[in-house]
Amino acid sequence: MYASVILELSIEKALDYLIPEPLLGMVHKGVAVEVPLRGHIQRGIVIDVKEVSAAAKVLPIHRVVTDIVLTADLLELALWMAKYYMTPLGRVLKTMLPAGVRKNTQAKQQYYIMRKVSREVLRKEVVTLRDSAPQQAAVLDVMLRVRKGILHTELLEKAEVLPSSVKGCIDKGLLSFDIVRSDRSPLQGQEYFMSKPKILRDEQQQSLDRINNSLERGGFHTHLIFGVTGSGKTEIYIQAITKALQLGKNVIMLVPEISLTEQTIERFRCRFHESLTVLHHRLSDGERKEAWEVIREGKSRIVIGARSAIFSPMPALGLIIVDEEHEHSYKHTDGSPCYQARDVAIMRAKLTHATALLGSATPAIESYHNARLDKYTLSALKERSAAKLPCVHIVDMKREFEKAKGYTIFSDSLLTKIDARRKVGEQSILFLNRRGFHTELSCASCGQVLMCEHCSAKLTFHKAAGVASCHLCSKAISPPTMCPFCRAVASIKYQGMGTEKVQSVLSAIFPGIETLRIDADTTKHKGSLEMQLREFRSGKADVLIGTQMIAKGLHFPEVTLVGVLNADAHFYIPDFRATEQLFQLITQVAGRAGRGASPGEVIIQTATPEHPVIRQAAAQDYEAFFTSEIETRKTFGFPPFCRIVKILFTGKVERFVGEAAHRYAQALARLLPPQYICHPVVPAGHSKIKDTFRYVCIVRGASQQPIRTAIAACDAKDLLPASVQRFVDVDPVSIT
């Protein structure tokens, strides 16, 4: 017997291997195996077992790594993805299978460290240990500053010590630890009270009836719930899941950010006895492997997770939900395949004869267009479940700058309203999609801006860390005192604002105000994001300051004020989706206000108060925005009226990359039908990342098939040198 194996390498076709007699009963479709190739052992997935091989020389399989890991529908989905996203099947399978599953990794436990004795006792111990055990003293220094406890990994980073130093403090009885509960089994070890289904409004009930009808009939169907923020989409999801479970069908629910995962679990655990499994990128390899096995064995009936959860090996799949379906975080852009999880979810529903359910207050233009064409069943929820939509005010920041006689972060009205909320015990959210303290460092003498030496990106100053950092490669340096270009001394100017500066300035204006900041800097450690959201929800902070991590789907009943600090940033992005992204961001973050008993207010600070998109977002008028945007797309021939493929060329030598990209694009243009457009090659939006130069070519046309054929023909001509890599991004979220 022979096995056709797809390797994790970029090899297009399957290779045949002999199944040794001891492994005959273990090798099936979907099994992960190790096989020899050119003197090395490589991992791969068996996609077929047969009695005859056409290969002249067939080597035996080395060993079986794991049990069956891919279900039949996932194998079929992988074949579709390889074709649609123009990616070798091996890369698709590598993306589908978590590293822990492929490598059979065991789970590691995360620990939470706490003080076991009083602060006074710790202070005395620090003095004693300062000379004899300085690393243990450093650990205790950190523990004296934390409020209650700290994650083990964060403690090691802050104290700059090895794990043995923390263990030494525990052994001396100074510190204690607890295992961080894994959220992949969210019901385990937690107290909760079962709640009853809520009574639905008429428009909610009509939407649920349509979905239940699809579930009962069986077969593939796609629904789009277009509901304003706070209109009760989640309750429809929950009742649809209940129906699916009653019919013996299992469920996958996708959320765009892990910040939404815990909140979703909180809602779901009070309604379902069935086990829930959570999948997202912050799980360790071992945790993900354990969760994968629980799902595959049918022990979990509901999977909740971010993008990659769509590849869960869920048996009897009957319902797939994509919450906030418009979110660009569903698009995988970090290497091939550049898949869109929403579209993959719809295809998986088709392959499994399941119901796909999309939901958003601001649907993607393509999704709403499909609903208007009756490709999707559309349900509109135009009212909030309990509260009214917030009152929105647009503040002209040009007038605020005139009043302040210079630049100011906050308008007078926003500061007044923050203070008023704080005094009555209500909460506020401030949204700014830039992290760091200052977003630019430049020389006052020569005007040069400090850039990362490895990337085409400005350095951002982070005051707490005392470094100027690149947000592309994470390279950090000490801020220079002398200009590296003109050698002028003390000439470096710090400009621009990020979330760290907003927090600092707000604390200076209102001494004693309690703030929390959520961005990529404050949520590096596993569990830190969930802890901060829990703290804010429990009322431990007056103001939450954050990036787009806080703009989506979060439910804080005590938040009655939302401030959008710089609504104009997206106007400067050279991309046809920029206005859509701006409308979605403003509408979504505004929707965080007034979700409880008290009415909500939103203040949008902008230098372009008359811009139609700002006005439409303030009014939460998606229909007006869609009508305007769809006409623009049609006029200029952008999706959904065409298909776009972005080809990215990368390499270490800029001249070689540029020349190869132009040569490839010229050949591609000759192979495309006359009505298709192959745009000239240009440097990518970030033309250099980690010393790798990047060029892009955009191809537009009515159908993807001619583009796929032309790319395959170019690849066959071997136009690119080995030093230049080519990546294909089908349906890109950005053309830069």
Image: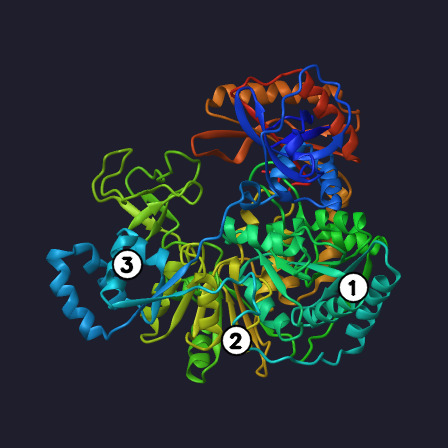
Whether residue 378 is visible: yes
Q: Which residue is mark 1?
A: 248
In terms of sequence position, does the residue under pointer 3 or pointer 1 come before the other? 3
Q: Up-down: is 275 above or below 72?
A: below
Left or right of 134? Residue 30 is right
Amino acid type indicated by mark 1: Gly
Q: Give the spatial CA distance, label 2 vs label 3.
A: 41 Å
Q: Give the spatial CA distance, label 3 vs label 1.
A: 48 Å
Q: Quadrant of residue 90?
A: top right
Q: Give the spatial CA distance, label 2 vs label 1.
A: 39 Å
Amino acid type indicated by mark 2: Val
Of 174 and 206, the residue lying toward us: 174
**Quarter holding the N terminus?**
top right
Determine whether the residue tagged by mark 3 lies in a helix, strand or loop. Answer: helix
Of 75 and 522, the residue lying toward us: 75
Determine whether the residue tagged by mark 2 lies in a helix, strand or loop. Answer: strand
Crowd around label 1: few <14 · some 14–19 · many ≥20 (10 Å):
few
* Location of residue 558 in the rendering, given as x and y in whole percent from the top left corner: 52, 78
Whether residue 322 is visible: no
Point out the frontmost of discs 2 and 1.
Answer: 1
Circle number at residue 559: 2
Crowd around label 2: few <14 · some 14–19 · many ≥20 (10 Å):
many
Q: Which residue is mark 3?
A: 167
Point out the frontmost of discs 2 and 3.
Answer: 3
